[in-house]
Image (tube, rainbow, N blue to C red):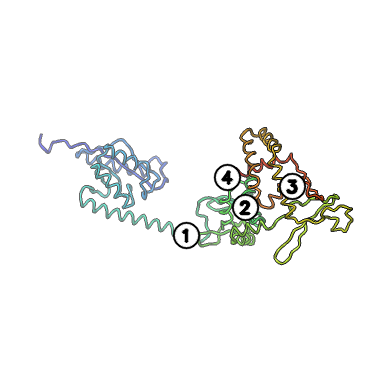
Amino acid sequence: MDAMNRPHRRLRCAIYTRKSSEEGLDMEFNSLDAQRDACESYIASQRSEGWAAIRERYDDGGFSGGTLERPALKQLLNDIENGLIDVIVVYKIDRLSRSLMDFARLVEVFDRNNVTFVSVTQSFNTTTSMGRLTLNILLSFAQFEREVIGERIRDKFAASRKRGMWMGGSVPFGYDVRDRKLVVNGDEAATVRRIFERYVELGSATELARELRRGGTRNKQGTLIDKGYLYRLLNNRVYRGAAVHKGNVYAGEHEAIISDVLWEQVRSIMQESPRKRANDIRTQTPALLKGLIFSETGAAMTPTSTKKGPRRYRYYVSMDVIRNRESGETTAPTRLAAGMAEDAVVAEVRRVLQTPEIISHVAAALREDRGKAAEADAIEALRDFHALWGQLFPAEQARIIQLLVRRVTVTTTGLEVDLRKEGIAGIIRDMITSRKLEAAE
């Protein structure tokens, strides 16, 4: 047999197709099919050279050419490494890649496995120097085109934001999207306003987040609102009707949920350092024993205060003294320093909570409710009460004292504290829940 009639070695040809968007892929004959038809026709024209298309399809619909993270491309490279392919056929070079750097990596894989790369509309052979030169020129233009398209998209996005248009992304809590525009969601908007107003009242994101989680307030995704989410919500200018792009603020097309006055109130609080805000909140100490403390004669002792210079001094004073009533022959104090009295009551509460009787009572109550795991949590919470108390805000401390203390009586020998032992289990249960919520934040 002479050289002219000697059969050529069979070359296994893989056809690779790609389309950036998914639009039109559900049509009976789409862009990927058109690319494949052109490649199959080209392979058929080279049948005399031993070319034959393999049955495996390598189609990436809806994937950008700016990345190599494409399922069909990965499968193609895997088959190349396994020696199953001799020639890769594409409709155009940019179907395989629009990035010069990425294509250089692909060419290295092709060369290492003796695979030839062919473009139907830009015919060349990558094993020749001329083919490589042509490849680099075409690929440079493909990358240039991609960058120009990207700039156009960015410019269009920026222009749309300047007009206040909604350009997609995560829909803010308080709004829904209709006809590509933000519209107010009534129920969620009410929650947003309440959060802003409550933050102005409390002045603390930590305390507000804890309050919202206890109340079961959830975000648009259905998860409990934590401190990080709360800060993002309070800083989101969309709620005052603004559209933001790269730090610039424009008037939005959507309706504002928060008034300018409320927005500025929140801003003024946030401009203070978190440490200063916490200190300010803690110095606004409520009367811990209000409504609970009485003189030996049975007269209520009301909280009062006086200011000397920059310092304020708090007291509990018997109503007998305030109304100039006779108090009898008792020698018990009718005026007490508030801090001293409150510290004494808190110390007594701590002491009682550490007694074996109370520990056993609380553990049994929670064991009936939630089992042995809850009993262990209860014992740990009782032991940690001293440390936890110092971390609570004054309002929370006052709430706990009101639940635990039935009455405080001022006598000649000191303070008599009557505790509501039946309420201790409930308090400890709340403490356990609060601790778990904070651990989840």
The residue indicated by pointer 2 is 192
Q: Please state which of the two labelled residues, at mark 2 or mark 3, is closer to the viewer.
A: 3
Q: Earlier in the sequence, mark 4 or mark 2?
A: 2
- Residue that appears at 21% across and 38% down: 50
Give the residue type that dot 4 points to.
Answer: Ala
Where is the N terminus found, in terms of image quarters?
top left
Q: CA distance from mark 4 to mark 3?
A: 26 Å
Q: From what the image shows, is residue 240 above or below residue 128?
A: below
The residue indicated by pointer 3 is 402
Crowd class of label 2 (few under 14; some 14 to 19; many from 20; radius 10 Å): some
- Residue that appears at 62% across and 38% down: 377
Q: Quadrant of residue 357?
A: top right
Q: Please state which of the two labelled residues, at mark 4 or mark 2, is closer to the viewer.
A: 4
Query: Which element is circle 1 on?
Result: helix
- The circle on residue 439 is 4
Q: From the viewer's side, name the closer residue of 306 and 45.
A: 306
How many numbered dots are placed on residues in this image?
Answer: 4
- The circle on residue 158 is 1
Q: Residue furthest front?
A: 413
Give the residue type that dot 2 points to.
Answer: Val
Q: From the viewer's side, name the closer residue of 208 and 384.
A: 384
- Residue that appears at 33% across and 47% down: 95
Q: CA distance from mark 2 to mark 3?
A: 31 Å
Query: Which element is circle 4 on?
Result: helix
Crowd class of label 1 (few under 14; some 14 to 19; many from 20; radius 10 Å): some
Q: Residue furthest bottom?
A: 309
- The circle on residue 108 is none
Q: CA distance from mark 3 to mark 1?
A: 56 Å
